[in-house]
Amino acid sequence: MEFRQVEYFLAVVENDGINGAAAALGVAQPTVSQALRSLERELGVQLFHRIGRGMVLTAAGRSLIGPSRQILRDVSAVSELMSAATGEVTGSLDLMVFPALATGLIVDLVARFRRACPKTTVRFGELRSEESSGSVIRDGHCEFVVAHLPLEDGGHGLEVIELGEQEYWLVYPPGTDLAPGPVAISAMPDIPMVFVPRGGGSLSLEFNDAMRRAGVRPPLAALVDHREARLPMVLAGLGGSFVERSLAESVRDVAVVRPCEPTFSRTFGLVFDPASLSRAGQAFVDLVRSTRPTI
């Protein structure tokens, strides 16, 4: 297995196909195709299902993503050793961020890091499920995770730097007739709601318990396992929902958005394995810790 093959494999994954990978790498499409097929022959497995012009990862391909990213970080670490004499931080900062947290604070921290370490690069990936926050680090998919706390799959062996709190608001479909100001849980309107199932997170349980104590049971429009589906369903008119403030405020020009009484919030933080930090990763941790009292 050659480093170039691993690099091309990840480029195909991250750019949704050979065309995007070739454009990102600045090489011809046949070069990427040949490297992939050569890698598959060497490993003796198929990494992608070829469906028309599209490519879908096989189970073997999915299992190769984490180790491949670790290989790239290891190669980057060698380059870091070569540049250590100059005192400059090089290499890559590799984060996966839960979509609702991918604005504001973490973006500001990454921008500060890039200004302080301009010879580094940043991969800002999407953490699709917070239930896998710890495992994506342990399996090598990334060096850092930004997620709500506490970690839903446990944080054994991992370190957490708490970054702040995220408030949750109510969002209702466009045109909903609702009085201005916060909505008291005890006076929630009789509007159908889109919820995640019970057990879908500590804050969901807290919100459901608050409604139960207040004797409130708004009609149920839908139960969704995928939290990302809540807001599209609200905007489609299916019902209201309880979402992160950052998401709520992003649609306040089209939807009806209200804070809750009482306030519901959940902490979020930066998660990493302190025993396997790259030089760039350690520099990022140092920056976060130095700025944390003022953020």
Image (cartoon, grey):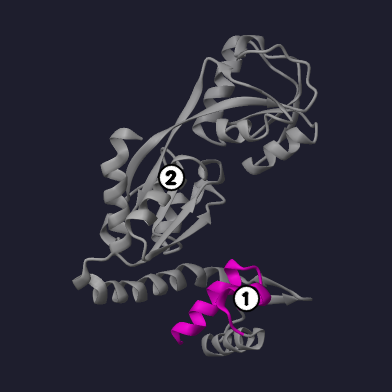
Residue 45 in view (yes/no): yes
Pick the front one: 83 or 257: 83
User: Distance from label 1 to label 2 (Cα)?
Assistant: 28 Å
Quarter where residue 13 is shown: bottom right
Mark 1 surroundings within 10 Å by alpha-carbon count, few (fewer than 14), some (14 through 19), many (20 or more): few
How crowded pointer 2 is (Cα within 10 Å; few <14, some 14-19, many 20+) is rated as few
Depicted 142 relative to depicted 154: above or below:
below
Image position of 180 with respect to 9: above or below: above
Between 30 and 45, the one lying in front of the other is 30
Q: Is residue 25 magenta?
A: yes
Say which quadrant the C terminus sits in.
Answer: top left
Residue shown at the point (66%, 9%) measured from the top left = 187
Name the N-terminal-most of marks 1 and 2: 1
Magenta stretch encompasses residue 179: no
- In-front residue for pair 285/191: 285
SS type, badge 2: helix
Picture residue at 65% right of the left edge, 68% below the top: 16
Q: Which residues are magenta?
A: 1-27
Residue 180 screen position, x and y as percent: 67, 13
20 with respect to 275 (left or right): right
In percent of width and height, residue 7 lies at: 50, 77
Q: Say which amino acid is labelled 2.
A: Asp
Residue 108: which disc?
2
Which residue type does callout 1 highlight? Answer: Ala
Is residue 60 visible to the viewer in this orientation of the structure? no
Q: Which residue is mark 1?
A: 23
Q: Residue at x 74, y 33 (%)?
A: 234
